[in-house]
Image (cartoon, rainbow, N blue to C red):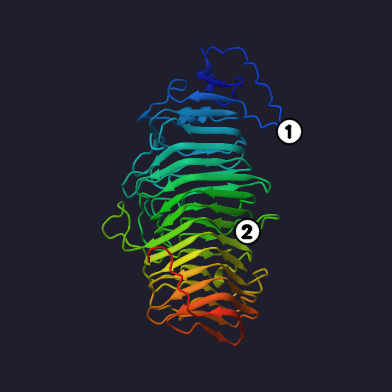
Amino acid sequence: MKRRTYLKTLGAVGVGAALAGCNMPDEETPTETPTTEEAPTPEPDLTVFHAVEDLGMDPTGQEPVDDILDGAYGDDTAVEFPPGDYLITREHDWDRGVSNFQLVGLGDSHKDVQFVFPPADPGERFRMLRITSGDHHVLKNFSIQQTDDDTTSADIWLANDDGALIEDVEWLGRTPTDSHARDQLLLFDCTSVEGVNVIRRVYMREGAALPGYPNGVAGIRITERSVGEIRMIDCHIEQRGSSSFRATHTRGVLRVEGGLFKNNDNTNMRISAGDHPTKTSWIKGATVIVDADNLNEHAREGDRLDSPEGLRIDSTGHGYTGVLIEDCDFIFRSSPSSPGIITAPTYGSHGGFTMRNCRIVNDTGVQTIYAGPVDTDIAREPWGMVLDNVTISGACESQPYGSAVVVDENRNGSRIVDSCIYLPNGRVGGVLVNRASNCAVESTSINVSGPPTRTRGVELLLDNVTYTATCAFRDE
């Protein structure tokens, strides 16, 4: 049994037996506090159990580890798993207000430690962990093996007040439809306004059934009980049957940093600004790719995307406003029909949003940007869309609305600044403004095969607009 600083006796049922016969050394001499202006936050004291040597778990996947796992769950406790397979046969409903609990794999790769599940029933709609209280839970360096059958699935729900971390975790195997799985693989909430919970390097990329909306299974969901901050860092979510991630009901915020979101059906990103008292949601440095003709090696014969969007800005009727999309790439190489690469649909009742330093490549007939009419009775102001240093290019030859960028009713105050639209093929217009007042295009080039700008019922301010720049992105 390993020990950090000192060993605490656990009140959880079953752990007492694991402690029997262990030699408990004297308390270690504490290290000196560094002589700096501000001492670092000390690591919490942990009782650390080796899953096999201390707790007797079977690493071959033959004997269930459920009872032992339940017994180990408690405050200031870590369970470390050596490489192997660990069989979970039932849901672990841990709503005990526990603080500082960790499940950590010891392998060199997160695939070295895998949690496995019974096939079919109870492998259908199976929740591995349900943790709806407490703080500072860590799930790290392991995989969840769903297998390649059409029924086995496993999901996690983790809601903490603060300090939760899911890092280097992958869902392996094929995700079935929602007839055999829950609506998403990970529910992740922050239940304190001041709290911050983190998802880092979570992977979902081994394919899923693609039945079309609404029967596909999403990747990550942030729910209405989340009121603090969720950070999602360097995740790779690919070929899900529904949204890679969704945060539309949340009163808190979601902040996405980096990551690849590729060929996810319904939408690759779905976010709102949130309703936090001091923060707003953002997506920074992420890449979205849709190439429906080139699904990855985990696709089966007959798998096809139904209607993949790039980004949907949507507050599910709550009227939030102000989300930021920055330093992101959106690349559509091939796609079936879709509402758009970037959309803010009316039914989402979202107010304004800003895209800054973003690049969009559209080689398809999918609408490039559609900022739909605003429901002014619900959506908060400002309602406008701002494109700041946004590049739109590609080989597309037509657009459903005739123009690449559509600013629809009541998106008042929308602005396109320091941007470039270069779509020379077919007949593609640049910007359409429909009954949205006080809109402007400034210091921007619109080099397109159709009309550069069109308006309906309003005037559009044009200031320093040119029509000849070529701003192709990457190797188009």
Tell me if label 2 and label 1 are in contact, CB under 8 Å: no
Q: CA distance from mark 2 to mark 1?
A: 36 Å
Q: Is 118 on the left-hand or right-hand side of 66? A: left
Q: Residue type at mark 2?
A: Gly
Mark identifier at residue 437: none
Q: Give the x, y percent position of residue 475.
A: 38, 63
Residue 197 vertical placement versus 64 (above, below): below
Residue at mark 1: 37
Q: Give the x, y percent position of residue 93.
A: 53, 39
Which of 409/190 is in front? 409
Q: Is residue 274 visible?
A: yes
Instruction: Classify mark 2: residues with Cα within 10 Å, few (<14), some (14-19) or many (20+).
Output: many
To which quarter of the image does residue 248 belong?
Answer: bottom right
Residue at mark 2: 274
Q: Is residue 403 visible?
A: no
**Which residue sits at x=60%, y=66%?**
353
To which quarter of the image does residue 25 belong?
Answer: top right
Q: Give the x, y percent position of residue 432.
A: 53, 81
To which quarter of the image does residue 383 belong?
Answer: bottom right
**Which residue sits at x=56%, y=28%?**
77
Q: Is 221 on the left-hand or right-hand side of 215? A: right
